[in-house]
Amino acid sequence: MDNVSFHSSQHVHSTQDNRKEGWKMLLENIASNALHDSRARFDAPTCDEDTRVEVIKELMDWVQDREAPQRLLCMTGAAGAGKSALQQTIAGKCLKSNTLGSAFFFSAGDPTRNNLTHIVPTIACQLGLRNSALRDAIGKAIEEDPLIFEKAIGIQMDTLIVTPFQRACASGGLDSSTFPHAILIDGLDECSGEDNQSELLTTIKHCLLDNDLPFRIFIASRPEWAIRSALDNNPEDYLYQLAYNMKLSDMYDATGDIRRYLWIRLRGIGSRSRDRRARSHLWPTKEDIEKLVAAASGQFIYAATVVKYVSERRGSPVDRLRAVIDWTPEGGQQTRPLEPLDILYRNILSTAKQLYEAVDTNRGRDFLQLIRAHQMNSDYRFGLPHSTRNFDEILSLEEGGDHVLFSDLHSLVFVRQDPTITRVWEQIHFYHRSFSEFLDSKFRAQHLFVSETRVRQYVAESCLQKLLQEEDFMEDWSLSMIIDALVRYSGNQTAYVDNLRLIDFTRNNGWGRIDERLSSRVETDPFDIWSGLVRFTFDAIQRLNDDLQEHELADIAKSYFDQWKKRCQEYGFKEKL
């Protein structure tokens, strides 16, 4: 057998070829659409000059302060709060300052970047392009394990990023103190599957934070379950001490920036328009701008949607802006100026509905009906709202049921607490006024719409059901609350109560149960509750007699009605029935 010898130059050449082959394989496994300067994102939103100045400064200060202990920043905010525009802006600034290591923008509608398949290779590729020694080390790692792209992302992160980076530093080919160190990840919530979102956060902790690497990682997301649970401080979860949690919607009031954005953009549209009215210095009016600012509720997405609609080439910007300001779904218009916003709302609401209904413990409850009931309770539609805890009890939800209900809607709603009240007062609030208006409109909500009539019926019948329960220990405040809700939602009438429910309530001594619990409490309860109950009972008697021909049941209800009316009159209630 002939002796075979290899020259060192041949070995180097062969090694370089293998590394080039490994790098080629890496390029075949990236998501180019996820890059900050991708052609697929050519019209990506950015922050206008002189807007979001405070938050941009804070973000850039954090990126550039390489000595600060928290190397992970999680920016959470409501849907449409401008998170992606901020990420895009920070990416541009980091690129100019040579601190951008990599960026990955998730998108729910793009199958190449709505999952975890390509995120590690895409980050590794961008980092490798910043340094030839790192690029060679990554290529070598792929050469040694060509099946790496089929493995768990924790293994991918260690193999394609952590180990190559450490090797490049050890060889002297990479100076970690000057290496572009910012890793930006936008839209974590748009990565499909809560478990996948959690896996990525866990991987970042174990691979990038727990190792002595120089990276500063900036993640932006809606405040959905995965990121909330990772950052939770009660009990302290695995990222609580390691991450700076910037709550965008809470920490920065965007009203002034939205006003400035609208002025600049609409004036710019007007200056380019053929419509003489739009070119006038009187357009848009201050009143128009203030109406739009109020409707935006601090969320940039509303303002951006308006600007995009007004800027359409066909038609006058003056007429289009007026259409937005005057638009109502009942006006008979065929235009949908808020359709991009409505698509966002429908997607979020539909996903939350699917996740809620997949949980065994929801007992087949109607998710949309419960959401609508809480919305109507929170907006003072029927007088002062009940706290969410009290409203849960009215609807027979378990304690904390509203937290489960709104678990996947934290990008649209939030809970305010008032600890000064004896029973901790929690109240649901909406980030977007336009989302509440969306829920009110069948034209906008489409298949997700729930009518007010349906909610009234649901709450009224829930109250009757609560009053039938075998709970002799019901507290005084609870009884008053349930009667109050019954009166408000029924409008003092039984029209919102199903025939069988009314008959069942009367046959099962519902009126008697109320009487037992009322005792002689008239003087301690507001007259509007009592007057409403008396009128509701009077309406029930008429309906049982006239509509249902249930005269014996009507007599039962009348016996209690007479007692309550007389008792009320003794305490000054003079209304005639």
Image (tube, rainbow, N blue to C red):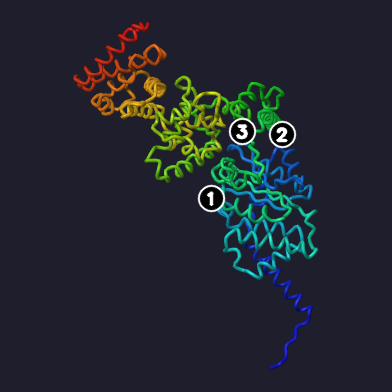
What residue does disc 3 label? 299
* Quadrant of image for the C terminus: top left
The amino acid beneath tag 1 is Ser
Residue 190: % across, % down: 56, 47
Q: Is residue 105 above or below residue 329?
A: below
Residue nearest the viewer, comparing 84 with 230: 230
Count of numbered badges drawn on the protein: 3
User: Counting residues from the N terminus, which is met first, the one under dot 3 or under dot 2?
Assistant: 2
Kindly report the distance in space between the C-alpha atoms of the residues bearing marks 3 and 1. 24 Å
User: Counting residues from the N terminus, which is met first, the one under dot 1 or under dot 2?
Assistant: 2
Answer left or right for 465 relative to 177: left
Q: In which quarter of the image is residue 340?
A: top right
The amino acid beneath tag 3 is Gln
Give the structural element (helix, strand or loop) at label 2: loop
Answer left or right for 415 relative to 569: right
Whether residue 521 can be seen here: yes
Residue nearest the viewer, comparing 476 with 52: 476
Residue 115: % across, % down: 56, 53
The amino acid beneath tag 2 is Thr
**Farthest residue toward the bottom?**
1
Q: In this view, does 475 lie above or below 154?
A: above
Give the structural element (helix, strand or loop) at label 1: loop
Residue 429: % across, % down: 53, 29
Residue drawn at x 58%, y 55% as measured from the top left:
116
Q: Quadrant of residue 28?
A: bottom right
Mark 2 burial class by Cα count in 10 Å: few <14, some 14-19, many 20+ = some
What residue does disc 2 label? 51
Residue drawn at x 76%, y 48% as measured from the top left:
66
Residue drawn at x 71%, y 42% as measured from the top left:
89
What residue does disc 1 label? 192
